[in-house]
Image: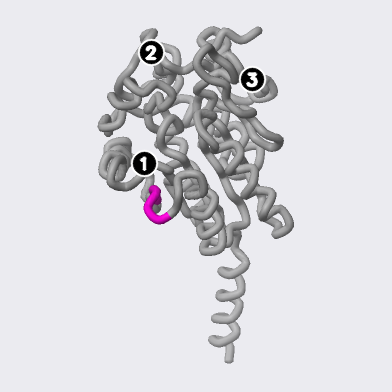
Amino acid sequence: MKTWIAFILLFVGLSAQARTLLVSDVDDTIKLAHIKDLSEAARYAFDSRSRFAGMSELYHLIAKDQPDLEIVYLSRAPDWFMGRTHRKFLENGNFPDGEYINRTNYDSDVHKIYTLREVMAKVRPDKVIFVGDNGEQDPEIYKQISEEFAGRGVEFHQFIRVVYPKTSILLVLPEMMLEGQTGFVTPVEVALDLEKAGILKSSSVQNLIKTVLPKILDEPSYTAEGEVAFPYFVNCRDMVWKWDAAIPRFDGVKSVKDRIVNRCKLRP
């Protein structure tokens, strides 16, 4: 009898544990892609090594601090075109294991929406971390999914990498950031928000800063390949810094801020 009671309590305890879902876009979010320039996009299309500095380390820390983590790498690129490169990229970049889903059955305009609905139904998470960029439709897609599941007690954390300005001579992007979303240019900003939300430990944030700070500070200008903090094509003038409260808590945050302000040409 005691054995059965212990089993039932264990089952109930496991069922009650929160499940965390991390969904990450690939191109221009963790992989250098420059999708808004056709010639450069073609050059990066088969580059399976060039990546944004510190993102794999960030994802590993999330996995360490959230043992129940489910990871999905989601791309709208068709499998026949980018599938092999993306899989090799995730391996070369030492990204944590996860499910890679690219476009197969759905039209490109609805692929991510339909796929995310399926993933949400399958995983049934309590916490969701969305990581994307402002080059395509990630802000709108993430916002829509968060609204669809708003009444189900799911906690959403949405991060959008600032790669392109809102407007330029060649293009006008939709709203870069929507309500409830945070823009970032290095993994440090994401880590600080996740620590505040109780998803990352403070020690993990400090370890990440220690790892990526030299790359952020010492990187040559106009770097185009390899592990890069600020690729030459990134225009982050619309970035908004909002982490001053973390400066006295974590060594190196002030240096990260100063580098971002200088590189993105922000008002100090």
Amino acid at the residue labelled 2 = Glu
SS assignment at label 3: loop
Which residue in the structure is indicated by mark 2?
Answer: 219
SS assignment at label 2: loop
Q: Quadrant of residue 8?
A: bottom right
Residue 115 placement (x, y as % from top left): 49, 54
The vertical placement of 73 against 177, above or below, is: below
Task: Tell me the CA gap for discs 1 and 2.
Answer: 22 Å
Which residue in the structure is indicated by mark 3?
Answer: 241
Q: Which residues are magenta?
A: 101-105
**Residue that appears at 54% across and 7% down:** 262
Spot the residue most to the right: 151
Spot the residue most to the bottom: 1
Amino acid at the residue labelled 3 = Trp
Given contact means CB atoms under 8 Å apart, are the residues at marks 1 and 2 in contact? no
Amino acid at the residue labelled 1 = Phe
Q: Quadrant of residue 130?
A: top right
SS assignment at label 1: loop
In this orientation, does residue 254 appear? no
Residue 265 placement (x, y as % from top left): 57, 8
Name the residue nearer the viewer: 35 or 206. Answer: 35
Query: If you read the primary sequence from the N terminus, does the residue marked by circle 2 or circle 3 appear first?
Result: 2
The quarter of the image holding the N terminus is bottom right
**Residue that appears at 50% across and 48% down:** 112
Secondary structure mostly taken by the magenta-highlighted segment of the chain: strand
The mark found on residue 95 in the picture is: 1
Task: Tell me the CA gap for discs 3 and 1.
Answer: 27 Å
Name the residue nearer the viewer: 222 or 82. Answer: 82
For residue 233, side relative to residue 239 (left or right): left
In this orientation, does residue 106 appear? yes
